[in-house]
Amino acid sequence: MCWKTLLLLLLYYNAQATVSHRWSRAVLFPAAHRPKRSSSVPLNPILQTSLEEVELLYELLLAELEISPDLKISVKDEELASLRKASNFRAICNDVIPKRIPDIRRLSANLASRPGILKKEDFERTVLTLAYTAYRTALSQGYQKDVWAQALVSLFQALRHDLVQSSSPRVSPSKPGPHQDLKPGTSTQ
């Protein structure tokens, strides 16, 4: 009987490790992993894969953005809006990042309880959510301004914590190698 229990526990542990690993990637931004039938958006879109794309993201954020009443974000500059990466930017901003307070609070809570550092795409999406929240904070008034400001502070604290963790020396052997991607502004030293 003892070996059967041991075998059952081992099987359960294996199944638990497999399931939690497979589904952990969709915890922070579940919309990034759900394809939409009506959209030509790629599954799990990413903006930053090179330094030039980081600079383009900076330009897109500095360009005049427009948020429609149905919370769709668009770039007003026609030249920037015509770029391929601008369509990924719109897809991430319109289909992936949370735009309502309950969803942003859920993201902040998940970030606060998450061990380790964020993956590059999660970091990028959190920064875009922070930028969106800052924009909404500036447009809000009264009680709504306070609610948006609290969400902004929570996201900022989560990003700050992640940056501090990623820049501190690692004790574990999972230190990124020279060919692994890093978030902008981080180093392996």
Image (spheres, helix red, strand yellow):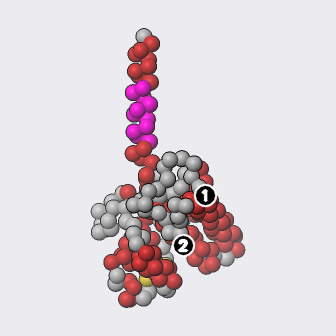
Identify the mark at residue 132; answer none if there is no mark. Answer: 2
Rendered location of residue 85, percent (x, y)? 36, 76
Mark 1 residue crowding within 10 angstroms, few (<14) / some (14–19) / many (20+): few
**Residue 182 among magenta residues:** no
Comparing 89 with 175, the one in front is 175
Q: Earlier in the sequence, mark 1 or mark 2?
A: 2
Rendered location of residue 80, percent (x, y)? 39, 85
Q: Is residue 171 above or below residue 150?
A: above
| Res 129 seen here | no
Q: Amino acid at mark 2?
A: Tyr
* Residue at x 40% of width, y 21% of height: 7
Asked if disc 1 and disc 2 are in contact, CB closer than 8 Å, the reply is no
* Residue at x 34% of width, y 84% of height: 82
Comparing 42 with 31, the one in front is 42
| Res 150 seen here | yes
* Residue at x 41% of width, y 78% of height: 52
Rendered location of residue 50, percent (x, y)? 40, 72
Q: Secondary structure at mark 1?
A: loop
Q: Which residue is mark 1?
A: 168
On the rendered image, what quadrant is the N terminus found in? top left
On the rendered image, what quadrant is the C terminus found in? bottom right
Which of label 1 and label 2 is nearer to you?
Answer: 1
> Magenta region's main secondary structure?
helix
Q: Secondary structure at mark 2?
A: helix
Mark 2 residue crowding within 10 angstroms, few (<14) / some (14–19) / many (20+): many
Picture quadrant where residue 95 is located: bottom left
Chain part drawn in magenta:
10-20
Q: Is residue 180 above or below residue 88?
A: above
